Amino acid sequence: MKDELRRAARHPGWRAAIVATLLAVALTAMFGGFRTAKARRAYPEYGANATIDNGALALTPLRAWISDARPGSEPNPYVPPARYLVLQLRAENRTGSSLAANSYLQSDVVWLRQVPGDGEKAAAQQRSEGHDFGFDLPPRLPVDVDLVWTLPPEAELPSRLTWGVLAREHVAETYLTGESGWVQRGPLAKLALEVEDRRAGAAR
């Protein structure tokens, strides 16, 4: 049995699986890092129009709302009803490349459905102007982006919500690829915004 375990440990496929498992555990712990009981610290909290630099991106939250339709769309009677939570922010890419920066955005800004609680990534991100899903974040050029979370149609949210921002750090060599890159480093700050109700029939 021991010999079989030794052979398995030397197998490249098993090694890759072990690395992937450790990475998943680390990411799970990271996204739960906004739990006060675990973190044992308070994170600075920012409101609309405050800019937070997480290392790779400068992020400025602009507004938040709930709606019966995605940004740029109208409610469709032929699809199951849903509600959408939208956080609109201005993102400036501080890295030298646009290749990975937009994926950083969706990973680094998470909704704290419960505070304290785990961070929940947006289901989609769209450019605010034109509402396209496929877009780049060119270096040093601010772009307005809508992060969108899909909710059940009966979901009711408080008028003020909180998001978490995770930090990134540039390293010369990552342990997975051996190349330089931007590595996520855990919780950095919180965003707290009033949420506008844009649902059909909502009080104005």
Image (cartoon, helix red, strand yellow):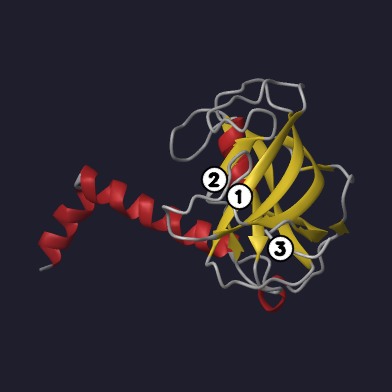
Q: What residue type is labelled 2?
A: Ala
Q: Which mark is residue 201?
A: 3
Earlier along the polypeptide chain: callout 1 or callout 2? 2
Q: Where is residue 190 in the image (x, y as percent from the top left)?
A: 78, 59
Does dot 2 land on a helix, a strand or a loop? strand
Question: Camera-side residue: 31 or 114?
Answer: 114
Q: Are marks 1 and 2 in contact (CB under 8 Å)?
A: yes
Does 21 sit left or right of 86 as displayed?
left
Tell me the amino acid under the disc marked 3: Gly
Circle 3 packing at 10 Å, graded few (<14), some (14-19), many (20+), is few
Front one among 107 and 25: 107
Q: Residue furthest bottom?
A: 37
> Contact, CB < 8 Å: mark 2 with mark 3?
no
Q: Residue 148 carries which label?
A: 1
User: In the rendered view, would you say 66 is above or below 107?
Assistant: below
Q: In x, y percent, where is residue 191?
A: 80, 57
Chain-order first, disc 1 or disc 3: 1
Q: In the displayed structure, would residue 130 be above or below residue 184?
A: above
The residue drawn where x is 71% and y is 58% is: 164
Q: In which quarter of the image is the N terminus?
A: bottom left
For this rendering, which residue is in front, 33 or 172?
33
Q: Is residue 109 left or right of residue 107?
A: right
Residue at 59% over, 51% down: 69
Residue highlighted by disc 2: 124
* Image quadrant assignment for residue 99: top right
